[in-house]
Amino acid sequence: MEKTYSRAFKEAYVILRYLDKEEYRKIPRLTIRTIKKNMDLEYEYEINENFELDEQDMMPETRALLYNIYRDYLADEEEREEINKNQKNERIKNEKIKQKKYDPSILFEDKEKSKVIIPEPLQATINKDKDETNNHSLPVEIQATDEGVFIRIVNKIKKILKIK
């Protein structure tokens, strides 16, 4: 297992040991065993009792792990619903950001704006070089079909299997 995650398991285990017995018992034994099994035994992590949990120095992976444990095992039903609602809203927000960022019309629009303008004498040289390299290429026959890619693949498979 990657060192980062094994250290996060160690940090989470140390923090979970500070829970009172009643809360600790809410976490399934299998989850605790998995954390113990995957934690880095050589990594030393200590809690500073002068700080609250959210002020503790810990890895982001540890925070995520503890967040999931809290959501799944320690939160009451009302809190769990609120957390799930917030996570769903966050996913929707992130998806909208991705859609804006990777919108094809914007991607191609940016390329048009960033085209390099080549001076006319240099452009003539480039075109001349292109013409010289194109003279040495083999002719390629391109067939225009109305079939989609999927239909062509299916037809090839049928041809191989000799199905009509």
Image (cartoon, helix red, strand yellow):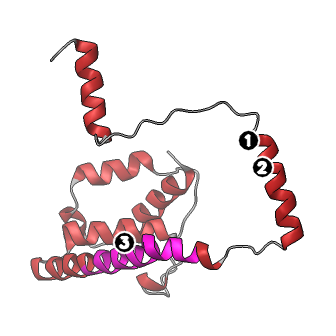
Give the distance between the C-alpha atoms of the residues marked 2 and 1, in whole angstroms.
Answer: 6 Å
Q: Is residue 86 above or below residue 26?
A: below
**Mark 3 falls on what kind of element?**
loop
Q: Say which residue label 1 marks.
A: 134
Mark 1 and mark 3 lie on one chain; the one further toward the N terminus is 3
Q: Is residue 98 above or below residue 148?
A: below
Residue nearer the viewer, 98 or 31: 98
Q: Say which residue label 3 marks.
A: 18
Give the distance between the C-alpha atoms of the residues marked 1 and 3, in whole angstroms.
Answer: 73 Å
Residue 130 image label: 2
The span shown in magenta is: 89-110
Amino acid type at circle 3 is Tyr
Q: Is residue 155 magenta?
A: no
Residue nearer the viewer, 79 or 18: 79
Where's the C terminus, which quadrant?
A: top left
Amino acid type at circle 1 is Asn
In the rendered structure, the answer to whether residue 55 lies left or right of residue 92 reads right
Q: At 26% from the left edge and 17% from the top edge, which residue is drawn?
A: 159
Mark 3 and mark 2 lie on one chain; the one further toward the N terminus is 3
Q: Position of residue 141 (x, y in %)?
A: 52, 32
Residue 1 visible: yes
Residues at marks 3 and 2 touching, judged by CB atoms closer than 8 Å: no
